[in-house]
Image: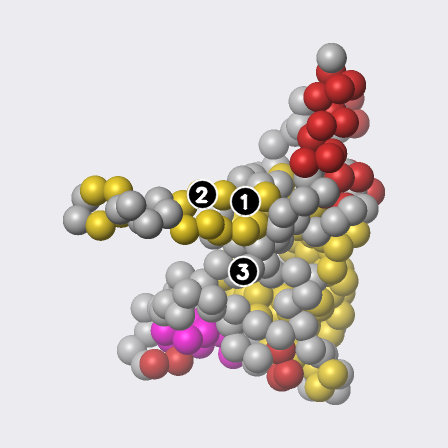
Amino acid sequence: MQALNGNMEKIILKFPLILLALHIQNGEFSDSPVLVIVEAPKPEVVDFNNTIYTTCQVTPVPNLPPSQPQIFGQVLFKQVFPNGTLEVKINLRGLPADDQQVRAIHIHQYGDLSQGCVTAGPHYNPRAVDHPGHPGDLGNFVSEQGVIRQFLKLPEAKLFGGQSVLGRALVVHEKEDDLGMGSDEESKRSGNAGKRIAGCVIGITTPNLWQKTEGLPGEEVEEGNESKR
């Protein structure tokens, strides 16, 4: 029976998932339901137990001045289709060992690094809201002994559907994000986080990289994996 259920799940996931959304007007359901199509990347969602895995290979932008660190590493994403919370693993290196500068990390609209991170465009902001309400606002990070290693969750971001962050760019900034608390308009657009000093494009991958990086600060150990720690 379990094998039959597993095969049925795979068959179902080969087609777009159709969700029925009921409009609510004045506290009551309207009689005009709207069909919303949520589609998962295929065949990956079938191959990897209903889960999408992505990687973003961070490299410094070209021609950085000597005052800026050369940041390398990975940012990994994982999400269970269709309603899982997006999980993120940050593993960056190349910062000075005594570096105390807080740095912001954001997802930007375009996966275009042809001119460094300049061509990545503004923050990814599909709902046209003020910063820091963008789904790809990861927050602020400070290195320890030259590395940034962190696990976090992004409840508003998705790897599938019409507002997926797949194919978009992730950018590391030189400064701290003011979280929209500044006095100027730029605060509401980008948090005044300064220059874009490193970045990458988010692309689908296998589970291997995610599984190799267990044990980041804030990460919960998956059941059955305790022996690996």
Q: Which mark is residue 81?
A: none
Where does the image place residue 82, in percent across and percent down from the top left? Answer: 58, 41
- Going from N to C along the chain, the mark reached first, 1 or 3, is 1
Where does the image place residue 91, in percent across and percent down from the top left? Answer: 70, 53
Q: Amino acid at mark 1?
A: Ile
Q: Nearer the viewer, residue 35 or 90?
A: 35
- Residue lying at the far top in this picture: please name it: 1
Mark 1 secondary-structure assignment: strand
Determine contact: label 1, label 2, CB under 8 Å.
yes
Q: Which mark is residue 18?
A: 1
- Residue lying at the far left in this picture: please name it: 26
Alpha carbons under labels 1 and 3: distance apart: 16 Å
**Would residue 69 be visible to someone looking at this image?**
no
**Would residue 179 be visible to someone looking at this image?**
yes
Q: Amino acid at mark 3?
A: Gln
Q: Is 186 above or below relative to 133?
A: below
Q: Characterize the local packing of mark 3: few (<14), some (14-19) or many (20 or more) Cα atoms within 10 angstroms.
A: some
Magenta-tinted stretch:
187-194
Q: Amino acid at mark 2?
A: Leu
Q: Is 39 above or below relative to 140?
A: above
Q: Which mark is residue 163?
A: 3
Q: Which mark is residue 20?
A: 2
